[in-house]
Amino acid sequence: MSYERKNISDLQAYVPGEQPQTGTVIKLNTNEHPDLPHQAVIDALRQFDPELLRRYPSPTAMPFRKLAAQTHGVTTEQIIATNGGDELLRLLLTVFSEPNGKGIGVSDPTYSLYEVLAAIHDTPVTRIARMEDWSLPGDFAKQLNDAGVTLAFIVNPHAPTGRLESVDTLREIASQFNGVLVIDEAYTNFAEHDCLELVREGSGLDNVILLRSLSKGYSLAGLRFGYGIASTPALIQAMDKARDSYNTDAVSQALACAALGACKDVAGSWKKIISERNRMTEELTLRNWIVLPSQTNFILAQAPGGIDDAVRIYQTLKEKGIFVRYFNHPRLLDKLRITIGTPSQNNMLIGALDNMN
Ligand SMILES: Cc1ncc(COP(=O)(O)O)c(C=O)c1O
């Protein structure tokens, strides 16, 4: 006898990248930052007052929201803090998409969790294929409107390709779309620009929410802290009603404040990753891989010998303890997504590739 809802029994659960728990592997498969968190975060963890564990934390993570508002040039009422960016995604579906309604819209391929969350919510997904060069089609908003979706997600810079759309492109989509547009900026720290101007005062938009995560840029994937920045407080108020009362805990709030407070310093580590990303692009290109220009902390690289080569290399690397990501998506079968690691990890990957041929 099974007791769950039909859509849950039919559900193909989200498959996270492999998370081997031994320290000996080189993990270039889930886009984690290769360095330790900033010293300010480590100090905040050491100095954390246990008395704060006895009490409930700030229900809305107010100190963090104030800091984020100051940092990004918006108001506190435009910020919501969540248990990782993933919790924000779940909240967005709960609040802005009718179960059994017209569903959500995404550009395809995209972060696969969106589809899983939609299936949990029992709502369909309209997939709009990216163009040959991975850009968004010119009639993206029209396609969303024609499908009647009320919520759409664009990852920018895009995962898994690393491509960055211009602010003007996204502004146009937001102004034409008859629903809430989520611009998922999980990787924005490694990009030339972000979309903050679309949520700042004067943007004229009432339907944009940016997703931010401390997992990638701040080396805090284990902390589980993300946040949303909305173009109007009304969007945040709606999500606040549906949020767990204490969705972020006292430890994560304290560490998130320490991390964002050190953002100017942490930016140095983003520059190092960008420079390694450029080096790895050159190294792989020299070896006949086709590497898409990336604005993230990973690259999507097409194996010289096509699909069979990509599968073989993925498996051989894994046997050698080097994990990269392979996607079972029709347009990605001949490609590997490789997170940028430390210079020595990157060199080990290149060395392993050279030893394979
Ligand atoms: C595109 C995208 N959005 C959001 C997230 C969520 O990140 P987190 O829940 O770790 O903040 C991820 C994580 O991999 C991602 O790749």
Image (tube, rainbow, N blue to C red):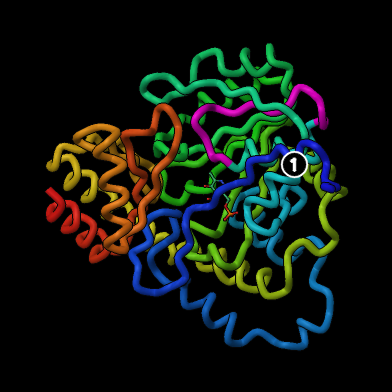
Q: Vertically, is 110 above or below 217?
A: above
Number of marks: 1
The answer to which image quadrant residue 50 occupies is: bottom right
Q: Residues within 10 Å of mark 1 (few under 14, many from 20)?
A: few
Residue 185 lies left or right of residue 152; in this view the side is left
Residue 323 visible here = yes
Residue drawn 66% across the image and 27% down it: 125
Determine whether the residue tagged by mark 1 lies in a helix, strand or loop. Answer: helix
Q: Position of residue 295 (x, y in %)?
A: 38, 42
Residue drawn 58% across the image and 21% down it: 172
Residue drawn 55% across the image and 59% down it: 214
Say which amino acid is labelled 1: Ser
Q: Nearer the viewer, residue 353 or 79?
A: 353
> Mark 1 = which residue?
9
Is label 1's Cβ within 8 Å of ligand 1?
A: no
**What is the magenta range?**
98-112
Residue drawn 55% across the image and 68% down it: 259
